[in-house]
């Protein structure tokens, strides 16, 4: 699968991802294929089945955020998650019911704040500010909780998860 981490900070956030994709037992890596994309003001990172990750990173049109928004979490639940669901549905994605690992997770950042969305289209926030998606994320999250930097956490994940490999890419997003 992959390793994606998000670190929420007071001034903004950092998203980091590895560069390995696997299919049919083979590893793939290419500099133009990244697991974190910019979609307007959004950072979008995806782990899991490739089709929904490609759709959310390259096809999805994030909804406009109202200028007077007061509750972004509510907006994520009522507007953003349904727009993601609709876009993935329109792509024709059908999860493989025989594959226990089928599915996807997204880590999204807007205005320097991280939100996590899973394949049930539920929206999650963490009070510790540490987010993870993919097969190596448990290793990386444990390292972060122990005081590691994002780079050290990604290196630990790569050493322990065969589906995670450098180079690592990062994006920082500041709060307005």
Image (cartoon, rainbow, N blue to C red):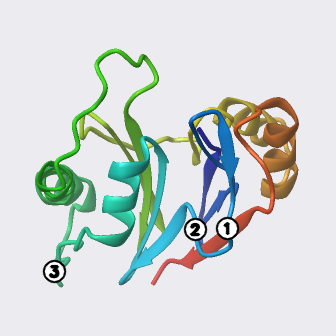
The number of numbered discs placed on residues in the rendered structure image is 3
Q: Which residue is mark 2?
A: 33
Residue 117, located in which quarter of the rendered image?
A: top left
How many angstroms separate mark 3 from mark 2 (CA)? Answer: 36 Å
| Front disc: 3 or 2 | 2
In the structure shown, which secondary structural element does the residue marked by tag 2 occupy? loop
- Which residue is tagged 3? 68
Horizontal side of 61 relative to 90 (left or right) equals right
Is 8 drawn above or below residue 68 in the view shown?
Answer: above
> Residue 33: percent from the left, percent from the top?
57, 68
How crowded pointer 3 is (Cα within 10 Å; few <14, some 14-19, many 20+) is rated as: few
Question: Callout 1: few (<14), some (14-19), or many (20+) C-alpha neighbours within 10 Å?
Answer: few
Q: In the figure, is residue 7 to the left or right of 112?
A: right
Secondary structure state at the residue bearing disc 3: loop
Q: Is residue 142 above or below residue 156?
A: above
**Residue at 16 percent of width and 48 percent of height:** 92
Sequence order check, earlier mark of 3 and 2: 2
Which residue is the site of mark 1? Answer: 30
Label 3 close to label 2 by CB (< 8 Å)? no
Other-residue count near label 2 (Cα within 10 Å), few / some / many at <14 / 14–19 / ≥20:
few
Q: Find the distance from the CA under tag 2 to the CA under tag 1.
A: 5 Å
Left or right of 99: which side holds 83?
left
Tell me if label 2 and label 1 are in contact, CB under 8 Å: yes
Picture quadrant of residue 62: bottom left
Quarter residue 7 falls in: bottom right
Callout 1–callout 3 Cβ contact below 8 Å: no
* Residue 11 sits above or below residue 7 on the image: below
Q: Residue 18: x and y, percent?
A: 70, 55
Label whose residue precedes the other's in the sequence (1 or 3): 1
Q: Considering the image in quadrants, where does the C terminus appear?
A: bottom left
Which of the two discs, 1 and 3, sits closer to the camera? 1
């Amino acid at each position: 699968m992959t390793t994606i981490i998000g670190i929420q900070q007071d001034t903004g956030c950092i998203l980091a991802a590895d560069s390995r994709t696997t299919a049919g037992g083979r590893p793939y890596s290419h500099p133009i294929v990244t697991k974190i994309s910019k979609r307007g003001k959004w950072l979008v990172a995806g782990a899991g089945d490739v089709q929904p990750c490609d759709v959310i990173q390259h096809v999805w049109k994030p909804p406009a955020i109202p200028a007077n928004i007061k509750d972004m979490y509510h907006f994520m639940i009522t507007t953003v998650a349904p727009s993601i669901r609709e876009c993935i549905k329109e792509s024709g994605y059908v999860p493989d019911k025989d594959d226990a690992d089928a599915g996807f997770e997204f880590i999204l950042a807007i205005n320097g704040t991280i939100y996590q969305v899973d394949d049930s289209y539920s929206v999650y926030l963490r009070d510790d500010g540490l987010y993870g998606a993919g097969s190596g994320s448990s290793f990386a999250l444990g390292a972060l909780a122990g005081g590691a930097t994002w780079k050290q956490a990604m290196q630990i994940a790569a050493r322990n998860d065969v589906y995670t490999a450098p180079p690592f890419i990062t994006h920082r997003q500041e709060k307005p």
